[in-house]
Amino acid sequence: MPRNNTAKRIFNRDRRPGDLVFAGFFFAFAVFLVSQLGSETKWIKGTKVFAQPTFWPAVSLLGMALFSACHFFGSLLSSKQDGRLVEVRFWARSIEFACWFMVYVWIVPIVGYLPGTILFTNLLAVRVGYREKKVFVAATILSITIVILFKALLSVKIPGGLWYEYLPDSIRNFMLLYL
Amino acid sequence: METFQSSLELLLRWDVIAALFLGSIGGVIIGAIPGVGAAVAIAILLPPTFSLDPIVGLTVLLGIYGSSMYGGAIPAILLNTPGTAVNALTTYDGHPIARDGNPRRALSLAYSASLAGGLFSVVCLIFLSQALAVIAPHFGSREIFLAALLGIILVVLAHRGQILAAGMMACFGIFLNTIGLEPVKYTRRYTFDQTWLASGIDLIVIVLGLFALSQAFLLLTQPDEHPNPAPVRGGLFEGFKELWMYKRIAGVSSSFGVLMGMIPGVGEFTAQFMSYTYAQKTSKNPEQFGKGSAEGLVASEAANNAVPAAAMIPLLALGIPGEALTAMMLSVFYVHNVIPGPQLFANQMDFVMALYIALFLLNIIVVVFLLFSTNGILRIIQIPTRFLGIIIATLGFVGVYSLRNSMTDCAIGAVFGVFGLILKRLQLPIVPIILGMVLGGIMEVKLRSSMARVKTPLDFVDRPIAAILFSLIVLVIALHIRSFLSRSKKEQSPH
């Protein structure tokens, strides 16, 4: 029992709901990566240890495994917080917005930066619950401002939409360069 | 004098002046919006600045970095919600002063203390740069390796109560940096036979995922909030006179800011808490702290605004970033083939000096802007949080996609966005990942080159600076173990 108390004193910490789930996954991930060390890195004969390609992945992964094991152990020993499932559901809900982002990335080279951005901001506004006209006006103005600022003024590398090819020459060049 | 003149020539260009105004005013606005912060803004703006001149790009980013904390004080005082994480301590005394019917006094004191801290640190930097120019060339591979190692250790130990989590995140960052084709023997590391992993994972993609996209996903998933601060009536000059009464607190706090800013991995939080504790211990009214003490407000604001200029010291002199924002700026240097470190001080002192002058000027621009535009900023704060999420996601796209027009980069960014959201919800540290990536890369290269000339382990620390750095590493770890054991003993004893 005293040994258990010492461990508790050393590893006890404030933990949020979902901490145990994350700590467990991260530890498992670290162990998986350590198990791949032999096949995913090379050991070259006649080369000093510090210059081996495997040296830094080994140092980082062993550190990661050690720290994550202690973190997981600490999570097991610390007092439990209610709401683990609610928290994990919250994380899962955020994946939907990551998918929205990827759809935006996918449509821009097809429909073009300006139309794609107007579509993205307005549809996302609907998705998150906005219904007022002023929000859609604001989303459209925001899209136009961002596109003009970054593509027309700062010339960031974002390709034109595929359908721009079907536009008359003069408009197509303008759209490809600025929108 | 010649250096000063040539640095002025660098600055007196319309594009640099525009960048200075854009960065400093933009930084104030960004800092004032809770949930955005300098890290998100700098992450988004990194790729667009790659196409600009190094001095222009760095002036924009420095402007945002140096001015965001000024803006962050506004919601901290008026809404009890810090605009940036480092303004958290400002809420302790700033908000009670505002709540008691004196928001003008609180804001004005915060602006004047921030200005004092900001200017003090730039003046210190200008004087220190001569000393740095002498010391920096003595840093060889092993000294830079040891300084980077010290930086990582300090970053981990600075996360009190979360050292294990900070350690695992720092190691994760070092691991991420090793993925892909290894640069000396050209072998693949952790690519799992995937060609898209062969070139490694770009630091900017991870920064954007962890800071910008995670914040966008968080704001979009959480319930909508509509902050509604009341407008501030009257002028904001009175705090500048009142600050004179607290000149000792402002001076000491600014010094703490400079000192802590120079040490990699320590930064604003430690500087603030040290200054706040000092102010409370030496105050005639210590019971007022946390209930609306002007001294407490001055201490926290002067200390945090002194840090950005000081944090540039390890970055410029040694090429070692001390925290996430300077780590991001390091990539701008590399993109333009300007390598921070001893050679920068020896060969491009005018460039370094130009950055210092820009930092000095931005503090003045920001305060003048704030004195006349605080109510305008209050209107921007009222953006509903979910709409803010849409703005950040749209801007995040520019950052990630414009790097290489790569769908894969965006997918990696999105994955790290969700990962960052989980870390934020669990209140686990994110910064060690970024520093692990940057410092891990530096350590790998420097250890390899320094070990080629080392025969016994003692040779590694046989030069004075290497010996000092090694002793510091041992001392820092020993002090941490001692404080942990004494805390442990205290908790164990019944009384």
Image (cartoon, grey):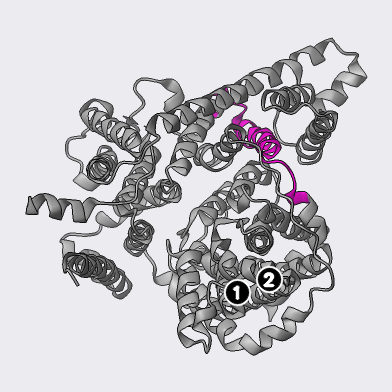
Residue under the image location 51 percent in, 68 percent down: B313
In front: mark 2 or mark 1? Answer: 2
Magenta stretch contains residue B139 = no
Instruction: Say what amino acid the circle numbered 2 marks.
Output: Asp
For mark 1, what is the residue? Answer: B292
| Rendered location of residue B468, percent (x, y) | 30, 74
For mark 2, what is the residue? Answer: B100
Q: Is residue B264 left or right of residue B145?
A: right
In the image, residue B216 above or below residue B98: above
- In which image quadrant can residue B25 be found? bottom right
Tally the marks: 2
Q: Quadrant of the C terminus of chain B?
A: bottom left
Give the spatial CA distance, label 2 vs label 1.
9 Å
Q: Is residue B199 left or right of residue B370?
A: left
For the stretch drawn in magenta, the main secondary structure is helix
| Rendered location of residue B88, percent (x, y) | 55, 61
Residue under the image location 59 percent in, 56 percent down: B84
The disc, 2 or 1, on the residue closer to the chain's N-terminal end is: 2
Stretch in magenta? B380-409
Instruction: Say what amino acid the circle numbered 1 marks.
Output: Gly
SS class of the residue under badge 1?
loop
Q: Nearer the viewer, residue A84 or A122?
A: A84
Count neighbours of disc 1 (C-alpha within 10 A) and say few if under 14, some if 14 to 19, many if 20 or more.
Answer: many
Disc 2 and disc 1 on one polypeptide chain: yes
In the image, residue A16 above or below residue B247: above
Q: Is residue A171 visible?
A: yes
Count neighbours of disc 2 (C-alpha within 10 A) and say few if under 14, some if 14 to 19, many if 20 or more.
Answer: few
- Contact between labelled residues 1 and 2, with CB atoms less than 8 Å apart: yes
Q: Is residue B279 visible?
A: no
SS class of the residue under badge 2?
loop
Q: Quadrant of the N terminus of chain B?
A: bottom right
Residue under the image location 71 percent in, 41 percent down: B384
